[in-house]
């Protein structure tokens, strides 16, 4: 399974970072993600740092649904995880299947995203500016690429760090806190 080599940071000046993204990579794709995270009834999936998510993405031209499984973190500093993902034709059926297998909804929330895809160091990269309404509309940036093996993770993360530095994002603002945990804490 490939590893999602990703870094996430709190954005203190969203307008400046947005301008940098637009200047470097062109107009971004505005999308709304509706995420549903599932867990085993005893909480064992998420307590083992694994994730099972159904995401429905509403874009300007289409709506698509993706099923994602993420294994436990393989790099504590970045939070990078092995990831398997596939597009789903029928979102309602997929939710029924997952529930039928005994999984229960742990948390659901919305993310408002602007996505930029580009090449860097021979890698396909995705930069996403994220607002989560339940987190006081805080803005985050995620930059990710794929590491094919564990040995490829360090160079992949180095490329991600370079992109973030070029956008003016300081490493002091990096975070490994999961949105699921942040939203759950905000609701408590």
Image (cartoon, rainbow, N blue to C red):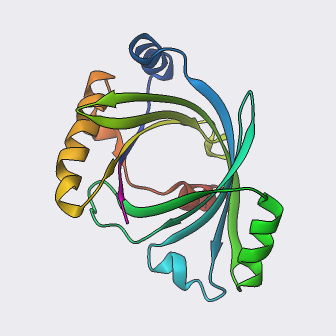
Quadrant of res 63: top right
Relative to 61, does residue 98 appear above or below in the rendering?
Answer: below
Relative to 71, does residue 15 appear above or below in the rendering?
Answer: above
x 65%, y 72%: residue: 38
| Magenta-highlighted residues | 1-5
Name the foreground residue: 135 vs 180: 180
User: In x, y percent, where is residue 182?
Assistant: 55, 56
User: In x, y percent, where is residue 161?
Assistant: 25, 37
Decide if residue 112 is on the left or right side of residue 93.
left
Decide if residue 183 is on the left or right side of residue 123.
right
User: In x, y percent, where is residue 165?
Assistant: 26, 28
Quadrant of res 77: bottom left
Tally the numbered discs. 0
Identity of the residue furthest to the front in this view: 89
- Image quarter where the C terminus lies is bottom right
x 18%, y 51%: residue: 154
User: In x, y percent, where is residue 112?
Assistant: 65, 36
Quadrant of res 117: top left
x 81%, y 67%: residue: 93
| Magenta run includes residue 92 | no
Relative to 129, does residue 13 appear above or below in the rendering?
Answer: above
- Image quarter where the N terminus lies is bottom left
Name the foreground residue: 109 vs 31: 31
Decide if residue 130 is on the left or right side of residue 83.
right
Identity of the residue furthest to the bottom in this view: 42
x 24%, y 45%: residue: 156
Name the foreground residue: 174 vs 158: 158
Identity of the residue furthest to the top in this view: 23
Magenta segment, prevailing SS (helix, strand or loop):
strand
């Amino acid at each position: 399974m490939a590893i999602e080599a990703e870094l996430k940071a709190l954005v203190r000046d969203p307008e400046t970072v947005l301008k940098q993204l637009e200047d470097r990579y062109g107009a971004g794709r505005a999308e709304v993600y509706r995420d549903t995270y599932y867990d085993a009834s005893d909480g064992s999936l998420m307590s083992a740092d694994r994730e099972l998510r159904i995401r429905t993405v509403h874009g300007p031209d289409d709506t698509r649904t993706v099923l994602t499984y993420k294994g436990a973190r393989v790099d504590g500093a970045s939070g990078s995880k092995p990831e398997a993902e596939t597009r789903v034709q029928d979102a309602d059926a997929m939710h029924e299947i997952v529930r039928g297998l005994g999984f229960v909804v742990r948390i659901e929330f919305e993310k408002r995203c602007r996505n930029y895809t580009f090449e860097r160091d021979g890698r396909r990269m995705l930069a996403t500016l994220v607002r989560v309404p339940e987190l006081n509309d805080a803005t985050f940036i995620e930059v990710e690429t794929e590491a094919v093996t564990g040995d490829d993770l360090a160079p992949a993360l180095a490329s991600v760090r370079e992109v973030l530095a070029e956008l003016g994002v300081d490493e002091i603002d990096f975070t490994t806190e999961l949105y699921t945990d942040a939203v759950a804490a905000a609701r408590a």
